[in-house]
Amino acid sequence: MAKDGSNRLKNKNLKIFADGLTLFEFSLKKNLKGCWYDEFMVISNSIDVEEICKKYPEVIFIKEPNILAKLNDSWQVIKFILKITGLFPEDILVYIPTTAPLRTYNDIKNALALFTINKFNGCNSVVSVCRCKEPPEWSFRQKEGYLDVKNIKMTSQELTPYYHLNGAIYISTVEKLEKYDGFFKGGKIIPYVMSYDHSVDIDSEEDFELARYYLNKKRKNKQYMPDMDSAGGIFKHD
């Protein structure tokens, strides 16, 4: 999904990100480099996004109802896609938001392999995550104007690793999405762990500039390979 506007960073989908391309087209072009998908769909209520998609004949563009775009609910958009496209229960849906432009081809390929290996072992979905930089054990509430630091764990050896969603990759089958009403409500959810420099999810101007910084750094260090960057199936960004 690529709706008009944005709550925090205005028109981020159409901001020039790199190579003279908007964030949307940069992510779209990268994801079309992959060859594993049978259908590549973009859903949007944006006329500008629709015009960009016309440049890529392999893209199936779906016009998103404005009432659906206003909900700002990715799962409702996916349910709409499942309803109108006639996908089979065994079809694998890969949802890849364009707001994570540093996700690589190998990230998607490896996450998809992880799901394929585990889909008959009670796995509902594979979702991408990144390790939390700041451990929850170092977060505190205030109590009467002071920090409540009872049972604080100070050394890294005492800490349990925690992970947060990085908004880059979500994978499941049509059957399991319908059975569990989404990626998170049942079955086993397997994490695909990504590095920090692949995990920038753009919501703010600071995120936008951080993603550009990491991209330029990789290109400078010759770690960035445009033809091996990223691939997609169901394509969404907010």
Image (spheres, rainbow, N blue to C red):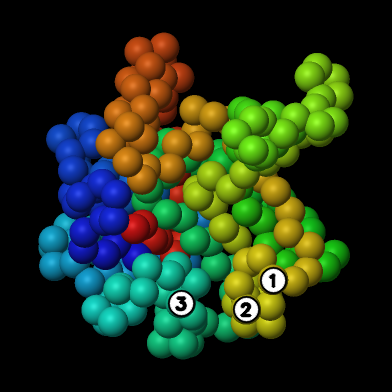
Residue hosting label 1 = 185
What amino acid does circle 2 point to?
Asp
List x then y, in percent, for residue 223: 45, 19
Q: Residue at x 36, y 74 (%)?
A: 71
**In percent of the image, x 73 and y 54: which residue is there?**
190
The location of residue 98, given as percent across then percent down, is 37, 51
Per the image, label 3 sits on a secondary structure element best described as: helix
Comes first in the chain, label 3 or label 2: 3
Going from N to C along the chain, the mark reached first, 3 or 1, is 3
Name the amino acid type tagged 1: Lys
- The kind of secondary structure element at disc 2 is loop
- Residue 178 vertical placement versus 191 (above, below): below
Q: Residues within 10 Å of mark 2 (few under 14, many from 20)?
A: some
Find the distance from the CA under tag 3 to the CA under tag 1: 14 Å
Whether label 2 touches label 1, CB < 8 Å: yes
Which residue is found at the position 29% from the left and 56% from the top? 7
Which residue bears the numbered disc 2? 181
> Distance between the Cα atoms at labels 3 and 2?
10 Å
The alpha-carbon separation of the residues under discs 2 and 1 comes to 7 Å
